[in-house]
Amino acid sequence: MALLSIVLPAYNEEQNISNTARVLSGILTENQIEYELVFISDGSRDGTFEEIRKEAERDPRIKGAEFSRNFGKEAGIFAGLAMASGDAVIVMDCDLQHPPGAIPEMWKKWKEGAEIVEGIKKSRGKESLGHKLSAGLFYKIMSRLIKMDMNASSDFKLLDRKVVDVLLGLPERNTFFRALTFWSGFRTETVSYEVQERQYGESKWSFFSLMKYAVANATSFSTLPLQLVTVMGMISILFSIILAVQTLVKYLMGTAVEGFTTVILLILIIGGFLMLSLGIIGHYIARIYEEVKGRPKYIISKVTDNVQGSVLGAWKR
């Protein structure tokens, strides 16, 4: 019988672990789906991993690991994919804002031949105005950069084992899971869902964390920001030519006005473009530097007792 693995990255989700395990186990058992739950504590500062360990002791189909520090959601997803042994793998949020009720439909589409089943959001649910605005800005930026609709897309996906193996085989350290599944090009189906309310805790994403996430993922997946440097250079040259022609015409007509306003304005505009361009180039150089160092995406410090040590060694490479 086919096995379904569910990967659940968690950061300071102590209150949600037990409820999530109970709800998922109930739905999967009810639909007669053979399963395992893989929790990844992303360097949580509360008792998240202790709760994962308790659930693993209660049910051998639940296993988990904890990072030595906070490595980010992307690292949590890929660690979970590496731990998962299922024929299909679902990635979803530990707070159950991705509705468990959509899992049977995703499983059915996989059984019918889909290799990727994308969860598509109908709405974002109830969120604060600030979070909606920051999330909206993040998705607009990412949609423009990678040329796919990120507003409806999410990390809630089902992947066939062959897709998981492809993603795990990628040599890059800086990854963007949501876009990489789109890039991989396998046969894709979709499932629509409504974002659910959190039962416990609150979102860990702030405006600044979303913007940082946007910049990191944009530069890891797209070279468009580098192309903007060229565009800004062309705009700067065009603006300089216009000012030069204007100045020459006024000089020939004898109406040139003494002063440094035009010069100062030109210096400020060109200087601003140069500093922004250097910042973009510097960020890409930093990404290259991180890739060249070859450090692992994550370091696992603890695992539940039902995880074999030989597998743990492979994750640490």
Image: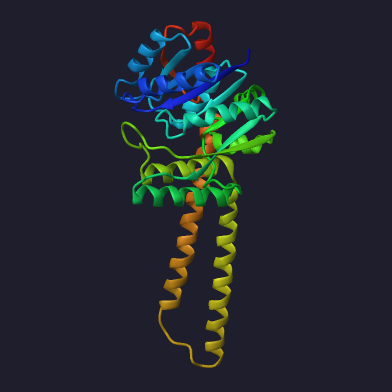
Image height check: is 209 above or below 39? below
Left or right of 283: which side holds 148?
Answer: right
Q: Nearer the viewer, residue 21 or 26?
A: 26
Total number of numbered discs in the rendering? 0
The percent position of residue 44, horizontal first and vertical second, equals: 34, 25
Q: Quadrant of the N terminus?
A: top right
Query: Which residue is rendered at x = 40% and y = 49% of the image?
Result: 132
The percent position of residue 160, horizontal first and vertical second, equals: 64, 25
Image height check: is 255 above or below 193? below
Image height check: is 77 above or below 309? below
**Outermost residue to the bottom:** 254
The percent position of residue 135, horizontal first and vertical second, equals: 43, 47
Query: Which residue is rendered at x = 50% and y = 27% of the image?
Result: 77
**Outermost residue to the front:** 30
State whether residue 63 appears in this view: yes
Query: Which residue is rendered at x = 62% and y = 15% of the image?
Result: 2
The percent position of residue 243, horizontal first and vertical second, equals: 53, 77
Image quadrant where residue 97 sits: top left
Q: How is the image coloured?
A: rainbow
Left or right of 165: which side holds 41?
Answer: left
State whether residue 317 appears in this view: no
Q: Nearer the viewer, residue 163 or 268?
A: 163
